[in-house]
Image (cartoon, helix red, strand yellow):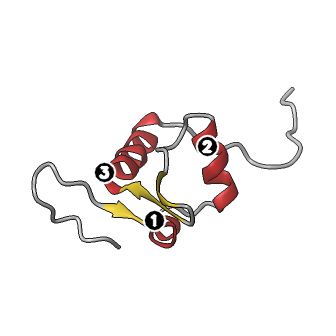
Amino acid sequence: MADTHQAPGRKVLINRKTLLGIIPLSDRAIFDMEKRGEFPRRIVLTSRNVAWDLEEVENWIRSRRQSGARALRPGPTVASR
């Protein structure tokens, strides 16, 4: 994981490989969440290289933990009677 010891005011950027090591989602899921405004936006460094702000990603993780949201189980659900 990226070194989180940083000088005040300096941003730590992480690449796709590091992001995927932190967030166990597919590239497509992350891209779709970015488009919907549900995940920190990538920063375009060059035409072939993007990065994410580590602090924004860590804040997103904290907000998910605090939300209390639960994933629904896949497949058909049985209605209770």
Q: Residues within 10 Å of mark 1 (few under 14, many from 20)?
A: some
Is there CB contact under 8 Å for labels 3 and 2?
no
Residue type, numbered disc 3: Glu
In three-dimensional space, the C-alpha distance between marks 1 and 3, rounded to whole angstroms, equals: 12 Å
Q: Secondary structure at mark 2?
A: helix
- Which residue bears the numbered disc 3? 55
Q: Secondary structure at mark 3?
A: helix
Residue name at image x 62 percent, y 34 percent:
36
Q: Residue 33, labelled with which disc?
A: 2
Q: Residue 22, labelled with which disc?
A: 1
Residue 47 lies, in percent from the top left, at: 56, 61
Residue name at image x 63 percent, y 50 percent:
31
Front position in the image: 48 or 53: 48
Q: Quadrant of residue 32?
A: top right
Residue name at image x 39 percent, y 38 percent:
66
Would you say 75 lies left or right of 23 here?
A: right
Residue type, numbered disc 1: Ile
Identify the image quadrant of the C terminus.
Answer: top right
Residue type, numbered disc 2: Met
